[in-house]
Image (cartoon, rainbow, N blue to C red):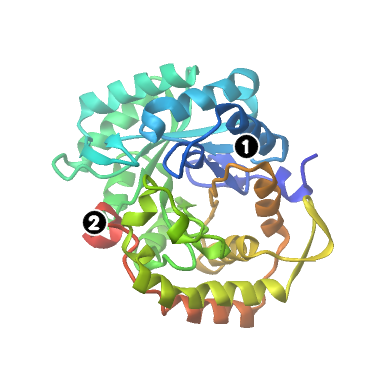
Amino acid sequence: MKPASATATVELGDGLKVSPLGFGGMALTPVYGEVDPAEALKTLHHAVDSGVSFIDTADIYGGGSNEELIARLLKERRGEVQLATKFALVGNPAAGYSDIRGDAGYVKQAAEDSLRRLGTDVIDLYYMHRRDLRVPIVETVEAMAELVQQGKVRHLGLSEVTAGELREANSIHPIAAVQSEWSIWSRDVERNVVPAAAELGVGFVPYSPLGRGFLTGTVDVSQLGENDFRRRIPRFAEDALFANQAIVAAVQSVASELSVSGHGAAPGRSATPAQVALAWLLAQGRRLGLAVVPIPGTRKAHRIDENLGALALNLTTAQLERLDAAADAVVGSRSVDPTWVSEGRE
């Protein structure tokens, strides 16, 4: 059964309407450890059953296997899904990327390959995953726009771009969404990118809205697998983690003051840190004047139910101020290479 709040839609940019929460498909790849494909497919079906119909993937996730997994969902439920995928990265998320490509020929070939793996004839939202600094963004976006003209793509998106790059791209073709890391402990996009998106009427799709799991208070770095790429992120280093526990404590404190009911929750049950982190992002969207649709990923169906509880959670002004203050004390970069994300190029 779908909760009432999940049956609503949110309009990003360029007329693209999606569910108020999305699902980040990267969680269903070996980047966080081994995955059971059968369980992964069950999780995807549960997401759609629950009203989470905005499904996000990329050609690089699992070397294409994530798109192939989602194809199994689409085979039965294409009409219920708003599908987003991405191009540009070459390599493997767990082992490291070997290249970024934004040349026109690559854009077109990558789209054809994704369409084949996904088993569909159209992609609802096609993102440039990262910026190829060797290629003018005009060339990349013009190639993406041709895909729209050909009916292979419906809307265009950009990931981890600067405000200037967003403005230039949007002058070539309407951009429906920017996808960048954004959460209580990753707020750098609020300086320039978010205001530009709000001005242009572009929606924002925060990835890692739960701080790659850290904000839930359940991540024990000492227990992360050898291939878990969080081991390489500076803010997951031992000294940074100790300082960053303060923001987890703030999120947990706010959660203990709130109750959430409805889908997946017993009446009067306390809110969870994940719900507070997501509710904070939704509140930020309202405060900053743009559509915000987070895409938390999970391998467990019950976590989807938990995440949906955030849609009914209202944070008070005082609680938002406490969370903002805790965010100011975060230690460590969110990326191994600062130029990899928008913050390092602004």
Amino acid residing under circle 1: Ser
In this rendering, which labeled residue sits more in front, label 1 or label 2?
Answer: 2
Question: Secondary structure beneath disc 1?
Answer: loop
- Pick whichever, 302 or 222, lies toward us: 222
Residue at the image point whose x is 53% and y is 48% from the top:
295
In terms of image quadrants, where is residue 40? top right
- Measuring from the top left, give residue 300's x and y in whole percent: 63, 43
Residue topped by disc 1: 53
Q: Looking at the image, is 157 positioned above or below residue 192?
A: above
Please tell me the numbered disc located at residue 318: none
Most extreme residue toward the left is 134
- Measuring from the top left, give residue 50's x and y in whole percent: 72, 40
Quadrant where the C terminus is found in the figure: bottom left
Residue topped by disc 2: 337
Residue at the image point whose x is 17% and y is 45% from the top:
133
User: Is residue 19 among the parts visible in the rendering?
Assistant: yes
Asked if marks 1 and 2 touch (Cβ < 8 Å), the reply is: no
User: Is residue 182 among the parts visible in the rendering?
Assistant: no
- Pick whichever, 229 or 310, lies toward us: 229
